Image: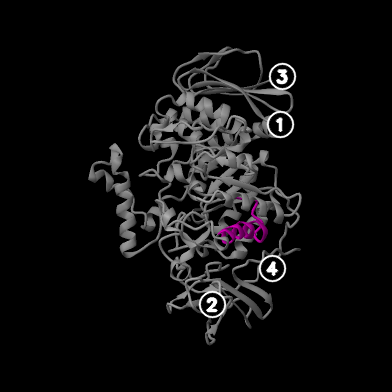
């Protein structure tokens, strides 16, 4: 048995059984008092630069707050535990109380990643997810990615309204139950990634402006809220240490940085990467994943593992559904050519004008390995940010979706699916939260106004169909219906998923260390012939057709898989995929 701990600069650090060191950066406060439940308040020591500290006689389980000079009592921004929510007290915890069952786990190489994105609350919390690990491992999933766990207002939330980034959300379980989930995943060979949100704080429970106004930079405000001053060392370190805390104390195998383009200080990313490299144990596989609207290929060259490929999703979505509203208009002109560029070069937008924003977007990415890009066609964003939360199978022909599903798993890009996708779930995934009063009304009406720009929701009566994000029923309606997994249709989808992942393990994963595109040829609308050079001196060849037309193709290769009905030699039927390999000439 072994324990793990990361000593933070900020917050409460247990030093002995009955001694805890407390630290708060509060540059806007003239004085700070430590308030421990059941004890008189104690004045904290100031270094004159905004840092307040105190060592107190107390141990694990101590409930505390900080009282700042405004007279307000606030939660610890680096709290490890908030059992009563973001407006409640913080609790001192002993990070070394949990005894790890699989402390020797070193992670997995990135080329082995098959990612399963999930929402912890919808799958029964940390304990509920742990019960699903065996079936995910048997399916061929090698990584689960948890939507943000930082503590948020209320009892249900996507996680992007978090305000206490060190405190795992209490509605999902205790800190030790989260560790147990990660430990159990490692026993089964499954990596665990965490989605982290550093570009903004949520609307409820964020008291930093009261005592640390310097944490923010109003010149960097965005649609998410007040900008964060990443150029200040204390702020930069607060978030860098948060990554290290999750990697070292909780043994996460990586993080996915949400909305990286909204973090204005580019130097912060380099500092993060360097600290991770210095801190993480030698030989351990740790992965830094980006969501980056800017398509900043430079970060991928500078040591970041991979990026969610929204361009790939968008091109596929337009081809599969025909939708061209909103940001899909960026891919409306020639989605087949866009998909070809994705498969060959990673990004579609590599510096050209984005017609949606009117600005140039992206950087050249053709030199990067295909494994630098995570391909998907469903995730929390792309499904839940639809007004009615429809899954792709509710919007497109099932045969076309199945052909694209085969592309997802058999291309050299890293595949990611969204919970329930493995059995072809039709359960919608809605935007949900748990706010009250005026804030709840603002969110409810704001969501409906957001969709008024779309033709389908310009009529007020149609907008009334958009579920209330704050309603418990909206949350419950988003829970994947596991009964559908056991239907004939669900079992067929599971069999397809299992088959495709077995093929990926045999023919693709072992040979992705130095994979490069060998060209993509457009056969016609919705149909492509793509080739990649693997590092086993073979060429992987995919013929993909998600249109209703049929195309002639050569048959001089070693066939490893075909998804189609009524296919004959030399023909690529409608809604089909053919996978082959050939030796490098």
- Note whether 536 is above or below 479 in the view shown: above
**Residue hosting label 4:** 96
Residue 499 in view = no
Badge 2 crowding class, 10 Å Cα cut-off, few under 14, some 14 to 19, many 20 or more, is many
Q: Secondary structure at mark 2?
A: strand
Q: Is residue 265 visible?
A: yes
Q: Quadrant of the N terminus?
A: bottom right
Residue tagged 1: 511
Q: Nearer the viewer, residue 490 or 308?
A: 308
- Comes first in the chain, label 3 or label 1: 1
- Alpha carbons under labels 2 and 3: distance apart: 65 Å
The residues colored magenta run: 236-255
- 545 sits left or right of 447 in the view: right
* Residue at figure coordinates x 73%, y 52% from the top left: 105
> Of callouts 3 and 4, which one flags the residue occurring earlier in the amino acid sequence?
4
Q: Classify mark 4: helix, strand or loop.
A: helix
The disc at residue 446 is none
Which comes before the other along the chain, label 2 or label 1?
2
Q: Is residue 176 left or right of residue 125?
A: right
């Amino acid at each position: 048995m072994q324990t793990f701990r990361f000593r933070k600069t900020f917050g409460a650090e247990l030093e002995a059984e009955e001694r805890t060191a407390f630290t708060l950066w509060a540059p806007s406060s003239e004085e700070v008092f430590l308030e421990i439940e059941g004890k008189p308040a104690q004045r904290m020591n100031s270094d004159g630069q905004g840092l307040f500290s105190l060592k107190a006689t107390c141990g694990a389980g101590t409930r505390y707050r900080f009282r700042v000079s405004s007279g307000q009592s606030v939660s610890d921004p680096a709290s490890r535990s908030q059992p009563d929510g973001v407006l409640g007290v913080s609790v001192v915890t002993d990070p070394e109380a949990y005894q790890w069952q699989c402390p020797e786990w070193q992670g997995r190489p990135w080329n082995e990643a098959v990612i399963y994105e999930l929402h912890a609350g919808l799958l029964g919390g940390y304990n509920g997810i742990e019960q699903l690990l065996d079936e995910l491992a048997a399916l061929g999933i090698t990584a689960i990615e948890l939507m943000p766990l930082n503590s948020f207002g209320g009892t249900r939330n996507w996680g992007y309204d978090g305000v206490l980034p060190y405190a795992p959300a209490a509605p999902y379980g205790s800190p030790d139950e989260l560790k147990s989930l990660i430990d159990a995943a490692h026993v089964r060979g499954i990596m665990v990634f965490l989605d982290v949100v550093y570009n903004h704080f949520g609307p409820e429970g964020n008291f930093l402006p009261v005592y640390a106004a310097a944490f923010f930079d109003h010149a960097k405000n965005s649609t998410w809220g007040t900008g964060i001053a990443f150029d200040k060392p204390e702020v930069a370190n607060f978030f860098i240490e948060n990554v290290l805390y999750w990697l070292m104390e909780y043994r996460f195998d990586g993080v996915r940085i949400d909305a990286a383009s909204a973090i204005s200080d580019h130097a912060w990313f380099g500092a993060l990467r360097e600290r991770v490299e210095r801190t993480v144990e030698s030989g351990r596989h740790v992965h830094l994943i980006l969501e980056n609207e800017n398509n900043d290929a430079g970060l991928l060259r500078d040591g970041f593992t991979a990026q969610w490929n929204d361009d790939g999703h968008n091109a596929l979505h337009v081809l599969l559904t025909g939708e061209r509203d909103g940001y899909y208009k960026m891919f409306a002109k020639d989605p087949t050519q866009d998909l070809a560029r994705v498969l060959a070069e990673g990004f579609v937008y590599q510096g050209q004008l984005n017609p949606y924003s009117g600005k140039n977007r992206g950087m050249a990415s053709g030199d990067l390995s295909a494994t630098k890009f995570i391909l998907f066609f469903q995730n929390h964003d792309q499904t839940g940010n639809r007004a009615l939360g429809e899954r792709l199978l509710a919007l497109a022909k099932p045969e076309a979706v199945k052909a694209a599903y085969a592309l997802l798993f058999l291309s050299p890009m890293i595949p990611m699916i969204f919970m329930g996708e493995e059995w072809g779930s039709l359960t919608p995934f809605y935007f949900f939260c748990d706010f009250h009063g005026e804030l709840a009304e603002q969110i409810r009406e704001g969501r409906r106004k957001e969709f008024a720009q779309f033709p389908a929701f310009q009529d007020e009566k149609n907008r009334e169909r958009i579920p209330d994000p704050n309603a418990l029923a909206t949350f419950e309606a988003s829970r994947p219906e596991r009964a559908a997994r056991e239907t004939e249709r669900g079992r067929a989808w599971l069999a397809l998923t299992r088959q495709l992942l077995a093929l990926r393990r045999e023919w693709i994963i072992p040979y992705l260390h130095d994979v490069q595109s060998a060209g993509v040829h457009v056969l016609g609308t919705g149909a492509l012939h793509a080739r990649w050079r693997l590092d086993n001196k073979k060429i992987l060849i995919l013929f993909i057709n998600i249109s209703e037309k049929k195309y002639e193709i050569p048959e001089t290769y070693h066939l490893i898989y075909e998804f189609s009905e009524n296919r004959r030699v030399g023909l690529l039927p409608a809604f089909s995929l053919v996978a082959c390999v050939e030796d490098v000439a």
